[in-house]
Each structure stands twice: as C-alpha cells, then as structure tokens.
Amino acid sequence: MIRIDSVTKRYPDGTVAVDRLSLEIPDRSITVLVGPSGCGKTTTLRMINRMVEPSEGTILLDGADITKQPVNTLRRSMGYVIQNAGLFQHRTIVDNIATVPRMLGWGKERARSRARELMERVGLDASLARRYPYQLSGGQQQRVGVARALASDPPVLLMDEPFSAVDPVVRKGLQEELLRIQDELGKTIVFVTHDIDEAIRLGTMVAVMRTGGHLAQFAPPAELLSAPADAFVEDFLGTDRGIRRLSFFPSAGLELLTTPVVAIDSTAEQIAARGTPDVPYLLVTDVDGKALGWSEPKDLTAGKVVPERLLPYGRPFESGKDSLRAALDCAVLSPTGWAVAVDGTGRVVGVVSQETIGEAIRGAHAERRKADLAG
Ligand SMILES: Nc1ncnc2c1ncn2[C@@H]1O[C@H](COP(=O)(O)OP(=O)(O)O)[C@@H](O)[C@H]1O
Ligand SMILES: [Mg+2]
C-alpha cells in the first residue's frame, strides 16, 4: 500500500501545489486523482516516485518511508506513463518497450521477446514492432507507453493523463484495455486525469482535488455520485449524476417478458396469442432471434412483415452484463417505451418496460440504503 501522510509541496517560488494531503492508496486497484488543471495532481504523482520531493510530510510504500531507499530502486518498482507516451523517437517500438529490461541488464533477445509479449498484452499488432513512434497513431503510441511501463513488471503503475490527448473513441478503447490489464495483472495503479467521467469509469477509489492542492473527497465512484461531499465536488461531477450512478446497478435482476416477442415465421394463431391489452406492441425477430422492430399486432400477418411499418427498437442492452443505466437508456430510446434485452450473441432474450426498470431502480436504492445502514 502507498500511504501519503500529510504531504505538502511548496515550490521554490512559494506556490503551494499540494496542501497537507493524506491518502491511502490500496494495493491491486486503480486509484484516480482527478481535479481541475493546476490543482496539484501531477505534483502528487511525482512525489510518489520522487521526481518531486515533498516539503513536508511522508510517503510510505508498504510501510517504509520512500526517502529511505535508493531512488533508482524505488523507480524500478514503479512504471510511469505520461500523455503523448513520451517515446524515444529514434528507437523502434520493440526497443522502446525493451528499454527498462535492457537497463536492468537483460540480453537483447530476452528483452525483445518480453517486449513482443507485452505488445500482445496491450493490444498492439506484432507487425508494428519494427516501426518508429512517428509511424503509429496517437492511440497506438499510448499503448506502447503502457507496455513500456509494464516491461519490468513493476508492482506500481503511475499514469499522468495518459489518454487525454486521444479522441474519445480511441480513449474508450484504451480505458477498456487498462481495465482488462488491471484484471489480469493486478497492479497498483495511480491514475491522474482531469476528466471526471474517466475517473468514474476507471477508479476503484477516486480522490477529487481542488485548486490549492486540497483533497475534496476520497471515495468509490458510486459514492461520489450519490453523496458528493460539498458543492465543489457536486459541481465538478456535472449533470446527470443520478442517471450516471445507475451504471453501478446491475441489470441482472430485471424481470424480462418473453410473451411480446414473436419470430417472423410465427403462425397467425401464435401471433394472436401474444398480443395482450397491456402489451400494445410485439417485438418481431428474424428466425435467428435477432430483433427486427416493433409492430402493432394488427399489422402482423403470419410470415409477412412490411419492414417500413416496423418501429425501430433502438439499441438493445445485454441482459446481466449491462447496467440499469444501459437498460433505461434503451427504454428511453425505444419509441414503444420498452427496452430489448439480448444475450452475448445478440439474440433477443426478452423485453422490459420503462415502468419495470423504474421499479428496479427504486428497489436498488432501497437495497443500497439498507446496506449503508447495516455497514
Ligand atoms: N516546478 C514548479 N514550480 C513552481 N510551480 C509549479 C511547478 N510545477 C507546478 N507548479 C504549480 O503547482 C500547481 C500544481 O501543478 P500541477 O501539480 O502540475 O497540477 P495539475 O497536474 O493538477 O494540473 C500549479 O499552480 C502549478 O502552476
Ligand atoms: Mg498535470
């Protein structure tokens, strides 16, 4: 565990970048430092690997003061990833990744084979190994940066706005990859960002900092959303707090209806049996069980669907895997007010109304309150 104990950083010009910060960073999880530009995130991160020395206070790594060990030993136990990757432009990708193992005295072949293994781990095609950084996209370069930081298998990874310079779609891919890597390798990651959504997506714990290097709140993301400590945190979290919080509630408990689902090759009797007064629309699927669209029962003739007459079903959610937020979004997007649930292969497993989702949300709140009261 990394423990930051009442740490202050005053730069020579008098700027107090970090002010009596105390944080316990748990092992094998992602702790995010988030806050507006200039609030002291980078300074905090750099004090952990001693690129910046604190003016006051101590930082402990597994109980030991980090100033009591040689700085090189400390840094070897901490991979460091920055924005724009900071790659060596004159070295190939494979040699960039092999940098630290080579410094540690590994032979060239062993270091390169380790580098190739890491390329695969971070989702880089082996064919890129001999290229130079400028021949890669921003997202690919960022993956190289992560691979390089992982090369000597350090227990700790320090990441300073690593994905801030890439576009939103690529960033999402990088975030997913980081969560996957974290799942597999169980590193202790300290991740800096100014993007609250990124913090909520990645963090096991999130430290919200405010200008002047003050800690405003340190909590799991769901708790930040449900109980911001003050007006600053609430403002920083932005709008739609309630909706966003639903992403921490699973859709697994939703009661799905299969009665309103008919295959396109159903007989007239089968179709007639499906339409009930409380279900004004039927979801039509193809013979493989993939959704085609919603139809009023009267517009359905057996084996014949006029595609133009079908209402779109919006975007389905994956039952059990996606959250209540995804399910609600599907229901809101659907012109019938019903969300379509699919399995991992895209086959329809049932439909669920906005009302049912609303009940599930109220139920989840009640459960959470009970758990909070109990513990
Ligand atoms: N080397 C330095 N000398 C003086 N002031 C600095 C130095 N580095 C950062 N600062 C100041 O410290 C504050 C925090 O900076 P920083 O840790 O980089 O914030 P963040 O990463 O959250 O944007 C800012 O006001 C910044 O201008
Ligand atoms: Mg910074």
Image: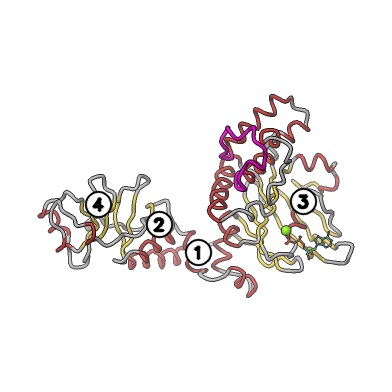
Asked if residue 123 is among those painted magenta in the image, a careful observer would answer yes
Image: 147 above or below 138? above
Query: Would you identify the image quadrant in which residue 253 lies?
Result: bottom left
Q: Amino acid at mark 3?
A: Ile
Nearer the observer, 142 or 210 = 142
Q: Amino acid at mark 4?
A: Thr
Image: 15 above or below 141? below
The residue indicated by pointer 3 is 48
Residue 181: % across, % down: 58, 42
Density class for disc 1 (Cα within 10 Å; few <14, some 14-19, many ≥20) is some
Using the image, tell me which numbered label, if any, was put on residue 285: 4
The CA span between labels 2 and 3 is 39 Å
Lateral position of residue 316 relative to residue 297, left or right: right
The residue indicated by pointer 2 is 251
N-terminal-most mark, 1 or 4: 1
Q: What's drawn in magenta, residue-wise? A: 122-140
Density class for disc 4 (Cα within 10 Å; few <14, some 14-19, many ≥20) is many
N-terminal-most mark, 3 or 4: 3
The CA span between labels 2 and 1 is 13 Å
Total of numbered circles in the picture?
A: 4
Residue 187: % across, % down: 64, 43
Residue 143: % across, % down: 62, 43
